[in-house]
C-alpha cells in the first residue's frame, strides 16, 4: 500500500495551509469579530469555508492525499512530497520522493510484499 504526504514550505503562512487542507491546531477566530457564525451569510456552508475565518496555527504536513493533489501543491507552493510504502503488517519499509516530472508509480520494490 502507498500513502502520500505533502509538507508545506516554511514560508507558507497558517491561513494558506488551512485553506489547502491542513488542520487548524489552535482553532481560529472570525475576522469580523463575531463570537458565533450563526446567522452570518458567509458561513452558510460552515466556518471552515468562510473567507473571513482566520487561523492562528495549522499543521504543516498533509497526509492521506492523492498523488495528484500532492503534485498540485508542489507546483503551487513548493515544499516537499513523498510516498510511504507500507508492508502488510503496517510498517513503513521505504519512502520515495514525489517528483513533478515523470511517473511516480513505477517504483520497483526490492522485496516481495
Image (cartoon, rainbow, N blue to C red):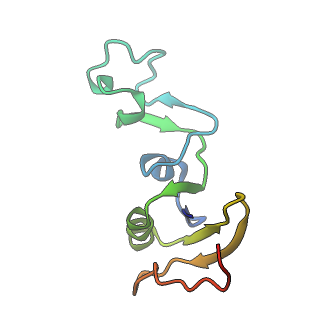
**Residue ranking furthest to the left:** 41
Locate residue 38 relative to residue 95 in the image: left or right: left
Q: Position of residue 83 (x, y in %)?
A: 57, 70
The residue sitting at 56% across, 55% down in the picture is 63
Q: Position of residue 12 (x, y in %)?
A: 52, 60
**What is the number of callouts on the image?**
0
Q: Please state which of residues 70 and 111 is positioned toward the viewer in this rendering.
A: 111
Q: Please state which of residues 4 and 62 is positioned toward the viewer in this rendering.
A: 4
Above or below residue 71? Residue 58 is above
The residue sitting at 55% across, 55% down in the picture is 62
**Residue ranking furthest to the top:** 39
Instruction: Indicate the quadrant containing the N terminus: top left, top right, bottom left or bottom right.
Output: bottom right
Above or below residue 101? Residue 74 is above
Locate residue 54 relative to residue 102 in the image: left or right: right
Instruction: Indicate the quadrant containing the C terminus: top left, top right, bottom left or bottom right.
Output: bottom right
Above or below residue 109? Residue 19 is above
Q: Quadrant of residue 86?
A: bottom right
Q: Position of residue 41 (x, y in %)?
A: 26, 21
Q: Position of residue 13 (x, y in %)?
A: 53, 54
Q: Please state which of residues 60 and 95 is positioned toward the viewer in this rendering.
A: 95
The residue sitting at 35% across, 33% down in the picture is 50
Q: Please state which of residues 61 and 17 is positioned toward the viewer in this rendering.
A: 61
**Residue ranking furthest to the front:** 112
Amino acid at each position: 500500500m502507498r500513502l502520500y504526504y505533502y509538507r508545506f514550505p516554511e514560508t507558507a503562512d497558517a491561513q494558506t495551509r488551512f485553506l489547502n487542507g491542513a488542520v487548524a491546531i489552535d482553532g481560529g477566530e472570525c475576522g469580523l469579530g463575531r463570537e458565533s457564525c450563526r446567522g452570518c451569510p458567509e458561513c452558510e456552508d460552515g466556518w471552515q469555508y468562510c473567507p473571513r475565518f482566520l487561523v492562528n496555527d495549522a499543521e504543516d504536513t498533509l497526509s492521506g492525499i492523492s498523488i495528484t493533489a500532492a503534485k498540485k501543491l508542489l507546483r503551487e507552493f513548493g515544499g516537499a512530497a513523498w510516498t510511504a510504502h507500507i508492508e502488510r503488517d503496517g510498517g513503513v519499509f521505504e519512502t520515495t520522493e514525489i517528483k513533478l516530472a515523470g511517473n511516480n508509480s513505477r517504483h520497483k520494490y526490492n522485496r516481495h510484499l
